Every structure is written in C-alpha cells, then in structure tokens.
Image (cartoon, helix red, strand yellow):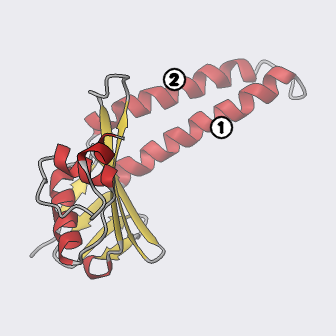
Amino acid sequence: MAPLIHRYPITALIGDYVRSAFGFFLTLAPMTQLPVSSVGFMILLPLTLLFAWLGWNTVQRHRSRVFTDAQNVRVEPSGAALAWSGLESIDLSYFSTRADRRHGWMQLSLRSGRTKVQVDSRISGFADIVGQAVSVARERALRIDAATQANFEAMGLSEVIAPPDYTEETARR
C-alpha cells in the first residue's frame, strides 16, 4: 500500500497566520518606540516573542506532511516516525473554543517509547488517521482512557473496546 499523505490546508491555518501576524505587529510597533530599559519594553518584548513563536509554529505546521501506511506514521520535515507495531498509547483530546462545547478541535497523540506524533483535526484525512490508530489500538489491546473513549464515540467510532472502568458517567467528566 502506498503511503497516504496528509497536510494542513492553508484554509485551516489562515486564522492562525492572521492572529500571530496581528499580535506580532501590534506589540512590535510600540515596542520599537520605547527605550530598552523601560517597563513597557519589558512587557511588550515577551509578548512579541510569543506571537513570533506562534507564527513560526504555524509555518512549521503548514510545511509538515504526515505519511501513513500499514506499517508506520511519519511526520516530515520533523522526522518523527512511529511504527504501528510499537504503538504504546493513544489519546484523542477535544479542545472547546466556546462554553457550549459545540465548537473546537480534536488532537490525536500517539506514543511509542520516546516518540510522540500529534496531529489535530484540521489536517486532511484526520478521521482516516484516527481510524487507523483505533484499529491498531484494538489489535494491541491498548488501554483507552474515558475521555479518549468518549471522543472516539463522538467521531462515530463506538466499536473501540472501552477500559474496564469506563462508564457513561466517567465520559461526561
């Protein structure tokens, strides 16, 4: 089987680009007008660096490609690679952007030894990556925590084997 290539489309990242650029220039402009030893400069400098870091992370995410096949999941250009046969843990987290929990994104974290691969739901083929990870987790009888199980169910993957202590009440926590 040829590897599937997953990427983050520009449409999914444009908001991150805009927010980081806006914050960077909003803090950089006044900072350049202040003396280096001023309190205002010392407050704006870490904020400017934070927005620059967020922008850099967005560029890195945009450049990244996730390759999946029957044996591996690999992220380029970072070089992080994980053999499905060595998968030790799987977590699917949901991050809400609103109080009503209707809007947000999911993040899949896969671990094998010291290797960690993370992808968020904005990547093309996210459901396919999660589905493949779930199949491997089921084959390997990995322990799935209640929150991850609830997120699998939210994606329509209710066939995942729940841990022995899993109940509907623990899923709501």
Instruction: Please tell me which residue is depicted at 33% across the width and 49% down the height of the picture.
Output: 147
In the image, 129 versus 102, the foreground residue is: 102
In x, y percent, where is residue 132? 17, 65
Q: Quadrant of the N terminus?
A: bottom left
Q: Return the mark for residue 24.
A: none
**Residue type, label 2:** Phe
In the image, 93 versus 82, the foreground residue is: 93
* Mark 1 crowd level (few <14, some 14–19, many ≥20, 10 Å Cα): some
In x, y percent, where is residue 47? 66, 31
Q: Residue furthest right?
A: 37
Answer with left or right where residue 46 lies relative to residue 56: right
Q: Is residue 92 above or below residue 46?
A: below
Q: CA distance from mark 2 to mark 1?
A: 13 Å
Answer with left or right where residue 131 lies relative to residue 19: left
Answer with left or right where residue 56 lies relative to residue 41: left
Instruction: Please tell me which residue is depicted at 35% across the width and 32% down the height of the picture.
Output: 14
* Mark 2 crowd level (few <14, some 14–19, many ≥20, 10 Å Cα): few
In x, y percent, where is residue 6? 22, 56
In the image, 157 versus 126, the foreground residue is: 157
Residue bearing the label numbered 2: 22
Total residue callouts: 2
Compare marks 2 and 1 and give the one earlier in the sequence: 2
Q: Quadrant of residue 115?
A: bottom left
**Residue type, label 1:** Leu
In x, y percent, where is residue 64? 35, 56
Instruction: Please tell me which residue is depicted at 29% across the width and 43% down the height of the picture.
Output: 169
Q: Is residue 105 above or below residue 77?
A: above
Answer with left or right where residue 83 lies relative to residue 115: left
Residue bearing the label numbered 1: 49
Q: Secondary structure at mark 2?
A: helix
Q: Quadrant of residue 133?
A: bottom left
